[in-house]
Image: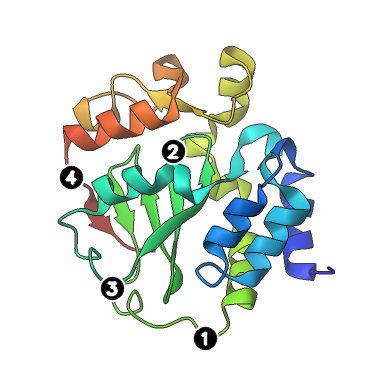
Amino acid sequence: MTDELFDAFIETFGRGKIRQQVPESALSRYRGVLPDRLLEIWREEGWSSYGNGLVWIVDPQAYEGIVEMWLRDTPVAGIDKYHVIARTAFGDLFLWGEGTGPKITLSCPLHTLIFLPGRVEKRVENADRAVSIFFTTLSRADCDKDHLFKRALKRLGPLGAEEMYGFEPALIAGGEMSIDHLEKVDLYVHLSILRQLGAPRVGAF
């Protein structure tokens, strides 16, 4: 399917790599839950990494526990049911609300829940177009923490599908946002530990 908006995402980040084929069971599970266009992207692209691992299109089911943990007792809890549809190498999670669309970014390393308070409850009007627009608005600069990605890739090596670059000590625990404090870590374990260190604060786009 021709999608000029998603093509712009490919122009920015390059073709997908480390591709995991999406099983029919996952397509069935999310049909009617996530946009049809996103499921088409899954079928065409798989769950893949882009930009040498800077951005990943992911399996939302793998992040269900992480989302529940991080959103508990926050201002957006209960507004909608949210699913992670993409993430960055540093653990920023891009959430899709079943009724509200792409209104929230969860920056786990910064312990910040990013959204516009006046728009977070607004229903998405055209989910298929909204998901394509979401991908085309992603930029390398926005996904790259303090321009550390290239240095992390060279120093620590490429990421696997369940890995991320994490700051150790964590920023919330007094760590520094520098290459000397980055490690390659298990994504799910690291994000769980980060949440145990404190609740996310609310930021704004």
Q: Residue at x 48, y 36 (%)?
A: 146
Q: Earlier in the sequence, mark 1 or mark 4?
A: 1
CA separation in Å, label 3 and label 1: 18 Å
Q: Which residue is mark 1?
A: 125
Say what secondary structure mark 2 lies in.
Answer: loop
x and y, in percent, of residue 40 in the image = 71, 63
Q: Residues within 10 Å of mark 1 (few under 14, many from 20)?
A: few
Q: Residue at x 23, y 48 (%)?
A: 200
Q: Earlier in the sequence, mark 3 or mark 2?
A: 2
| Corner quadrant of residue 18 | top right
Viewer-side label of 3, 1: 1
Residue type of the residue flagged with mark 3:
Pro
Say what secondary structure mark 1 lies in.
Answer: loop
| Relative height, residue 54 to residue 73 (above, below) | above
Q: Which residue is mark 3?
A: 117
Q: Quadrant of the C terminus?
A: bottom left
CA separation in Å, label 3 and label 4: 18 Å
CA separation in Å, label 1 and label 2: 28 Å
Viewer-side label of 1, 4: 1
Q: Quadrant of the N terminus?
A: bottom right
Residue type of the residue flagged with mark 4:
Ala
Q: Which residue is mark 4?
A: 199
**What is the number of the mark on residue 91?**
2
Q: Earlier in the sequence, mark 3 or mark 1?
A: 3
Q: Residue at x 25, y 65 (%)?
A: 76
Say what secondary structure mark 4 lies in.
Answer: loop
